[in-house]
Image (spheres, helix red, strand yellow):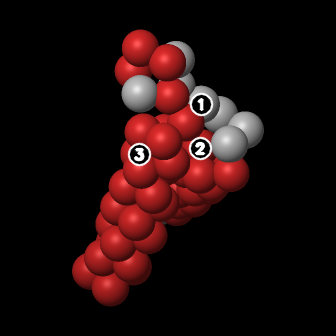
Amino acid sequence: MAKKQAAMVLNLIAWVTGVLVSLSIGFAMVGGTLTLPSWLGGSAVAMVVGWVVIVTTIVSAVMAVLQK
């Protein structure tokens, strides 16, 4: 039983870490800290991609919480 609870805690920590990293990257792309090379569209494309990352991360986190 203790192993199962430890695995659940580790899964939760990994999930929360993934959500936070995704949001950090998304906000960094929107804010201009992270950009794409000019041949990939530069900061304009990075801003759009950043918003896509933010929105999809929030939607998937809400869906995961509501599913439990």
Residue situated in front as seen by the camera: 15 or 32: 32
Q: Let me know if residue 3 appears in the view.
A: no
Q: Nearer the viewer, residue 65 or 47?
A: 47
Q: CA distance from mark 2 to mark 3?
A: 8 Å
Q: What residue does disc 2 label? A: 29
Vertical comparison of 45 with 15: above or below: above
**How dense is the environment of label 1, judged by Cα within 10 Å: few (below 14), some, or many (20 and up)?**
some
Of mark 1 and mark 3, the one earlier in the sequence is 1
Q: Which residue is mark 1?
A: 35
Q: Tell me whether circle 1 and circle 3 mark residues in contact (CB < 8 Å).
A: no
Where residue 1 sits in the image (x, y, percent)?
47, 61
Q: Which residue is the extreme one toward the bottom?
A: 66
| Residue drawn 55% across the image and 36% down it | 43
Q: Is residue 27 left or right of residue 8?
A: right
Give how far across and how far down residue 29 sits, in percent: 59, 43
In this rendering, the answer to whether 33 lies above or below 55 is above
Q: Position of residue 28 (x, y in %)?
A: 66, 46
Residue type at numbered disc 3: Val
Is the C terminus in the top left, top right, bottom left or bottom right quadrant? bottom left
Query: Quick one: SS at disc 3?
Result: helix
Q: Disc 3 designates what residue?
A: 49
Q: Does residue 24 appear left or right of residue 38 in this picture? A: right
